[in-house]
Image: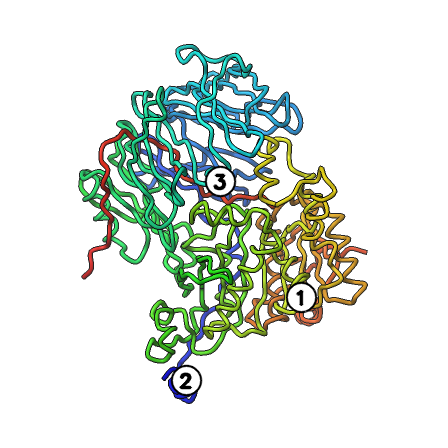
Amino acid sequence: DMLSLTLIITHVFIVTTTFAVDIIPREILFQDPKYSSVSLSPDGKQVGYVAPDENGVRNVYTRCSSCSYSRQVTFETEHPILDYIWTAIPDTAIAADKTARVVISDKPMVKGVIMVNNLLSDTILVGMNDENPALHNIYAFNCRTDELTLVLRNRRFPQFFFDNDMNIRLASEEGPDGEMIYYRTKNSGDPVKTTNPADWVEYLRIQHDDKAITLPLTFDKSDNFMYWIMGENSDLGNLVVFPFEDPAQKEILYTAQKAQIGNVLIHPVDKTLLAVTEVYHKPEIFVANDTFMDDLQYLVNLKPTGSIRIISMSVDMSTWLVTYQSADEPNDIYLYRRWNKKAELFMSTRPELKKYTLNKQVGFDFPARDDMTIQAYLSLPPQAPLLKSTQVPDGDRVYANLGMIPAVPQKMVVLVHGGPKARDHYGFSPMNAWLTNRGYAVLQVNFRGSTGFGKRLTNAGNGEWGRKMHFDILDAVEFAVSKGIANRSEVAVMGGSYGGYETLVALTFTPQTFACGVDIVGPSNLISLVQAIPPYWLGFYKDLIKMVGADIVTEEGRQSLQSRSPLFFADRVVKPIMIIQGANDPRVKQSESDQFVSALEKKNIPVTYLLYPDEGHGVRKPQNSMEQHGHIETFLQQCLGGESQPFQPGQYNSTAIIKKVGIEGPAIARLSAQHPSPRGPVAPSIFYRPPIRAQRVMYPPNQNVMNRIFPVQG
C-alpha cells in the first residue's frame, strides 16, 4: 500500500554527485547586453540593434545582413536609447550634425506615442497629450520633411484604431459599468476631424468580463474586413473575421486550445494568415498556410530544444530574423534566407554567457486551495542533482520526469511578477540565471489576475489583492515543500511593482511563512496608489478600480483598500526585509517607504532601505542595477545562505543612497575591510506591463484548420 511504499522510500539512501558551477559575474548579467532590440529592415538589407557605445551609452546601430559592415546611427551622449522602429524611408546618409534632434513638442510633461506606422508612407501618426494630460491628440509626422500636422484634436477617446492606409476607423472608451464601447466614424468615406458625438456611432460593446481577452487586431488588405480576438462565449478566445460594415457576421478562424492566442503572423503584403502561437508552458505554433509549413518545419528542426520566435521578416518575405526561446541556451539570432531554405547564425546577444552553465526552466500546474488550476515555472540550480521517477512516490513521478524533484530540498526564492495583468514566460531571464547560479531554486507563479491563461483566471484576481492572489503564492510554496523541492524554513519572496506589493503583503499578513523578502518599488498603500493613477490612464479608471477591488470615493472603499495595504500593518513584520525605492517613482511615494521603514525600526526588525534619487518605478540604469543586485545578493546570502560574488557598496559608482542597513551589514563590513573601495553615499511599475505584446496583425479568411508544428525526432 502507499504507506509501506512511503516507508521504504524514506529508508533508501540516494547517492548523488554534485558539480561546481562557476559564479556568473553580475557585470555580465545586469549590464546592458551587447545587442538588444534586434530587428530586420523592411527591405531585408540591414539588421538594426541597440548596443552600448564606447562611452557606455545605449545607441542604435545597423549591420549589413549579407556582409560584416556595421555603423552607428544615433549618437546620444546622456539619455540611452530604449527602442527604435523602422520606417518607409530608405537608408540615408547620417546628417553632418550627428546630435541634431527634431523636437515635436517643447511642452513639459508631454507623453508621445507612435500610434501607427505602415512602412509604406513617409508619414507616421503620433499621439501627444499636449493639451489634455488624459488624452492624446493625433498628429501626422513626415519623416522626410519633419513636418508635424494636426490630424485630430481629441476631446474624448483614450484609444484609436487605424486601417492599412492609416485612416482612423475606430475609437473606444469605457462605459458606465466598466464595459468597453467601440465607436466607428459616422461617415466612413471622409476623414474624421473631431471626437464630437455627432461624428461617431456605437459599433461594438464588450462586457467587462470579456475585455481581458478581446482585442481588435487590424484590417485585411482591402480594408473591408476586420479581424479580432473575441472573448464572447469563450474562456480563451477565438480568432474571428467579419465585414467591417456588419460585425454580426463573425466567422471563427481559430479557437484557442489551451492558452490565449499569443502572436498572429501574417504575410507582410498579402495579409494572409500564416500562423498563430499559444503560450501555456512554452510557445506552441499552429500553421495555417501550407506554403509556410516547410519553412517553419526546417526552423523548428534546426534547434528542437528551443521554441522558435520569428523576430521580423522582410516585406517580400525572402529574409527572416529568428531566435529560439530557451532558459539554458539563449540569445542566438539566426538569419533565414527563404529561397535556399537555410539559416545561419547571425549574432549572439550575450556571447559572454556561452561558457557558463545556465538553469533549466520547467512549466507545471498545481491546484490552489479552491481547486483553481494555477500555472507556474520552476528553475533549479544547475548543480542540483535530481531524483529519477523510480526514486519518488507514484504521485510525484510526473514531476520527477519533468526534472523538478531535487535530491535534497533547496533554498528557494519566490519571484513574483509585476502587473499584475501580466505573466511569467518561458525563456532566458538574467534574474533567474543569477539566482539559480547562486544556489537558489526560483518559483514563478502565474497567480489569478495574471494574463495569458483565459479570462476566468484574469478576472478571478479582481478585488483579490492581498487575498486570493496572495493565497495562490502561499499554495505554490506549500506545493514546492510537499514535493521536496524546497525547505520550508529557507524560502524568500521577492518582486517588483505588484510583486513588491505581494512581498510586503507576505511579510505583514503571513509574517511567519517566509524567511525574508525583497520589495522593489512595491506600493504599500493602495489608497495612494489609486490617487497616483497618471492622467493618461483615466480612460481605463473603472477597469483599474475593479482590479484593485474598491474606489477611494467612498468611506467603505477606502476602508477596503486600507485593510489590504501593508503600510498600515508594518508592525506585524518579524522577518528581515529589503526595500528598494526610486525617488522619482510616480506611483510609489518615497514618504510611504520612509514611513514603513520607520515602523520596522521601532520594532528593531532588520531592514535594508536603498533609495535611488535618479530612478522612478524601477531601477533601469546599469550601474544602479548592478549595485541593486549586489545588495540583494548579499542580503539573500545572509538570509538563506546561498553563494555570493563579493560586493561592496559604491563599487559600481551608482547613485544608491543606503538609508538603512539590515542583516547584510556585518558581511559588507568584513568585505569592505578586506577590499577597500569607494563607498556609496550613506544617508544621516504597480501597473507595469513588460514589453511583451501580441503582434497586432490581420488576415483574410482562408483556412479554418491549422496544423501544429512539432520538431522531427531523430
Of circles 1 and 2, which is in front? 2
The answer to which image quadrant residue 628 occupies is: bottom right
Q: In this orientation, which residue lies closer to the viewer: 163 or 365?
A: 365
Residue 504 seen from this side: yes
- Residue placed most toward the observer, 73 or 240: 240
Q: Quadrant of residue 174?
A: top right
Write the residue at 68% across / 68% down. Answer: 575
Q: Is residue 89 above or below residue 654?
A: above
Packing grade of label 2 (10 A; few <14, some 14-19, many >=20) is: few
| Of labels 1 and 3, the one closer to you | 3
Residue type at mark 2: give it: Leu
Q: CA distance from mark 1 to mark 3?
A: 34 Å
* Looking at the image, residue 573 lies above or below residue 496: below
Check disc 3: other Cα within 10 Å, few if <14, some if 14-19, many if 20+.
Answer: some
- Residue on which the image places disc 1: 511
Q: Position of residue 398 (x, y in %)?
A: 35, 69
Residue drawn at 46 percent across, 18 percent down? 142
Residue 650 position within the rendered picture, expressed as x and y whole percent measured from the top left: 67, 57
- Position of 471 with respect to 655 (left or right) is left
Determine contact: label 1, label 2, CB under 8 Å: no
- Amino acid type for the residue under numbered disc 1: Pro
Disc 2 designates what residue?
Answer: 3
Viewer-side residue, 184 vs 669: 184
Q: Which of the two discs, 1 and 3, labels the residue nearer the N terminus?
A: 3
User: Residue under circle 3?
Assistant: 209
